[in-house]
Amino acid sequence: MVIGVIVIVTSITVNTFQYLTKQEAISSFNEAGSWEKIEDTKDIVSNEDVPSEAEKTSFDSKINYLVRIPKIDSVEPVSEGTSKEALANSLGHDTSTAYPGEKGNCVIAGHRNYTFGKFFNRLDEVEIGDMIYVDTHEETYTYKVKEIKVVEPEDVSILDNTEEEILTLYTCTPIYIATHRLVVIAERVE
């Protein structure tokens, strides 16, 4: 019985810590500038300058974007890099890929379990045609899901550059087992 209580208390503590860390990151991003309502969602975007190239290529705890997926009630902070440190408290933008709003493939990775943070916990509920928004300090970019697939972990083709503005989100699947990668590909819409 004591072990059961310890497991429950530990789980609640980890979830609370992860939730508070995420909320703090989003609040920090939101405080960076002035805001306006975008589309028909309740979330916000800043008009402040975008980070410099040097800031984009090195990881720190700064949140540079927010990814909003209204279909699954998800607002997630995104930092630069996909290192263990970067993905511990946010989603991570693969710095070898395009940035939001640039021509090419913008790739963002994230965990989806209770051990590492449940940022993409409900990503498997996203369907073709759903909208995804990326809020930067400069503007909001709108994407529409055009493809969903599951690939092997060794399949790095999801990082390939494209001629169009594409947003690629990926995470481990199935949840808790993580033998494959769930990939959601969305194209930029005006």
Image (tube, rainbow, N blue to C red):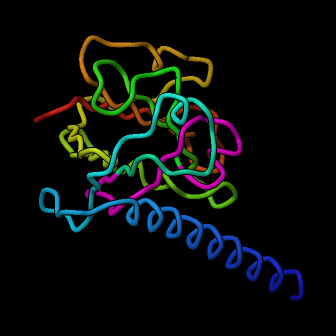
- Magenta highlight on residue 74: yes
Q: Position of residue 109 (x, y in %)?
A: 52, 38
Task: Farthest residue to the right: give it.
Answer: 2
The stretch in magenta equals: 68-90
Between 156 and 149, the one lying in front of the other is: 156
Quarter of the image for residue 128 reads top left
Q: Quadrant of the C terminus?
A: top left
Quadrant of the image occupied by residue 51? top left
Q: Is residue 62 above or below residue 93?
A: below
Q: Position of residue 167 (x, y in %)?
A: 33, 31
Q: Position of residue 45 (x, y in %)?
A: 27, 56
Q: Is 158 within the magenta?
A: no
- Residue 124: percent from the left, percent from the top? 41, 47
Q: Nearer the viewer, residue 152 or 79?
A: 79
Q: Quadrant of the N terminus?
A: bottom right
Q: Residue at x 43, y 32 (%)?
A: 183
132 up-or-down from 180: above or below: below
78 relative to 102 in the view: left or right? right
Q: Residue drawn 63% across and 45% down? A: 60
- Asked if residue 122 lies left or right of residue 37, the reply is right
Q: In the depicted view, which residue is nearer to us: 181 or 19?
A: 19
